[in-house]
Image: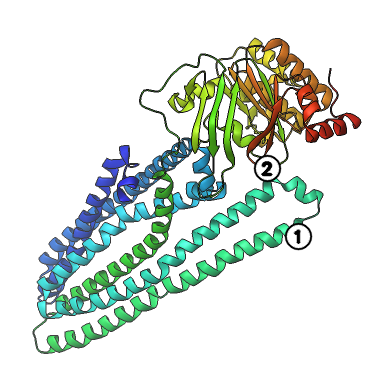
Amino acid sequence: MLHTLMQSIREYKRLTILSPILVVAEAAIETFIPFLMAAIIDQGIRPGNLSLVVHVGLLLLVMAMLSLVMGAGASWVSSQAAAGYAKNLRQDLFYHIQTFSFQNLDRFSTSSLVTRLTTDITNIQTAYQMLIRIAFRAPSMLIFSIIMAFTVNAEMAWLFVIVVPFLALGLMLIVSKSRPLFRQVFKRYDQLNRVVRENLRGIRVVKTYGQQDAETAKFKTASGNIFKVFSKAQRIVALNMPLMQLVINTTMLLLSWFGAKLIVGQQLEVGQFVSLFSYSTSILFSLNMLSMIFSQLSVSQASAERVVEVLNSDSAIVDKPTALTSVATGDIDFDDVSFRYPDTKTDQLQHIDLHIKSGQTIGIIGETGTSKSTLVELIPRLYDVTAGAVRVAGNDVLDYDLKTLRDNVSVVLQTTTLFSGTIRDNLKWGDASATDEEIQHAAKLAQADGFIQTLPQGYDTPLEQTGQNVSGGQKQRLTIARALLKHPKILILDNATSATDTNTEAKIWQAFRNEMPDVTKLIITQRLGGIVDADQILIMAGGRIAAAGTHRDLLATNEWYRQLYETQTKRGGGQHD
């Protein structure tokens, strides 16, 4: 885990190394100051040696200034190193997520990934700053103070050696009990993020159905779950301070008792006794700082494990070393293909045999849950087959460079997604170098140019997050135009016109027939009007191709298709030009 996390230090390695050096130097100076104070008392003030008091006092002033400079420098350096490290780690995590296949994304929920990119990395940043500063300062102060205590008086110093293990044992017990609870806290954070995300994305539906109270109750439950576990963990961690106070007070009592006896017996000077008090404070507060570090590490370890879990999850879909970098045609072949999702026992697709020639239009219909989308998602390798092979232009899709394959296979998924930016920015996702003429041509084919031209800023109209300031049908047309700008050899439309009216849909299909005769088109739809002229129509049922043929063939041979067509024709949903 540490090796994975340390890879994100990179350019902040020097600052990371410099911070502990400054901290150790600061600690060394601070632990020497009580020794000099003892000398002032025992050798300067008591004998009345004013010269020694002045000289040692000036040395103390210089050392205090040095300590201040070292401490301030360590604070600045550690904060810069920690912030830079968190920036790199967040970038590495986000970049790694971009390489994930659909299979990987099925494993990690969106809310969980958001928590890992934000809360978890913030916790790691805090721990990192503590590790390169306080984690060096506390042990340094502890070790130097014990050494100096033995230098002043070995008999009294053994008191610290006896007390420290008892405190350390108590702190270890506190950490071991609190750590599992902090792991639970972050799982509850994932649940809270999921509730918030669902509510904000569907806020219009929530208000439409008047479900504000129900959503508030869900949020209250999720927030309350965090409170319960977090407060339990904090109650355990809060035992740090009473334990520290008990040990400190006990140590001070013992130190005063034995110190007084030694002073009376003239075995210990007053100045030495004062310095021992200073060292006892330094030792015990160093342990207190260590307890704070352990508490933070309990929180951060859970966060680190969650971040590393993502970083160590390799994409389920990767390129071969000698991958093909060009797609010759739009031919598609499914050779005895079966597919099942990870961690399931049932095949979603079973023994699919299908052969599509370049330029053909294939309609795909079927009831909900018959794996229509799953079938087409295998072509651009959004998922990989479990058995059999999918071929494009005669080559197994596994042999293609992923970018090459996906540049030549354009997919408009069921869920239309637009991003913040202008309409032009969104369309250029298809081709960043597209000219204004190419953008407008693609928009015309998708029947989007008409409504874009009516907007005050045309193609430079800003879109809100997820495209909330355009209608569902307009969003679908924009995503189709974006897909067309890739100039694909294969175009997959997964219910891509479900929110458009039948007139507009008919114009889109007509434009495709006239302008894109060489592009292979796979159209998943519930409206038969757009696919009656398809070269072949597939009827999916139970993860298999239940029937296949032209519109006329299926009308004559398939009862389910005939009933669907007659139903849609009667209500006007199956008419076509």
Residue at position x 73%, y 47% in the image: 203
Query: Is 191 situated left or right of 139 in this image?
Result: right
State yes or no: discs 2 and 1 in contact (Cβ < 8 Å).
no
Q: Residues within 10 Å of mark 2 (few under 14, many from 20)?
A: few
Residue of label 2? 369
* Secondary structure found at label 2: loop
Residue of label 1? 213
* Secondary structure found at label 1: helix
Residue at position x 27%, y 49% in the image: 19
Q: Quadrant of residue 514?
A: top right
Question: In terms of depth relative to the viewer, which is nearer, 544 or 359?
Answer: 544
Query: Is 82 situated left or right of 44 in this image?
Result: right
Question: In terms of depth relative to the viewer, which is nearer, 100 or 148?
Answer: 100
Badge number at residue 442: none
Q: Quadrant of residue 11?
A: top left
In this rendering, does residue 429 appear at all?
no
Which residue, as the protein is rendered here, is positioned at the far right? 570
Disc 1 residue type (three-letter): Asp
Residue 531 position (above or below residue 438): below
Sequence-first tag of 2 and 1? 1
In this rendering, does residue 100 appear at all?
yes
Q: Position of residue 230 (x, y in %)?
A: 51, 66
Residue at position x 53%, y 25% in the image: 406
Question: In terms of depth relative to the viewer, which is nearer, 446 or 176?
Answer: 446
Q: Position of residue 61 (x, y in %)?
A: 22, 58
The total number of labels drawn is: 2
Q: Quadrant of residue 571?
A: top right
Residue 185 position (above or below residue 434): below
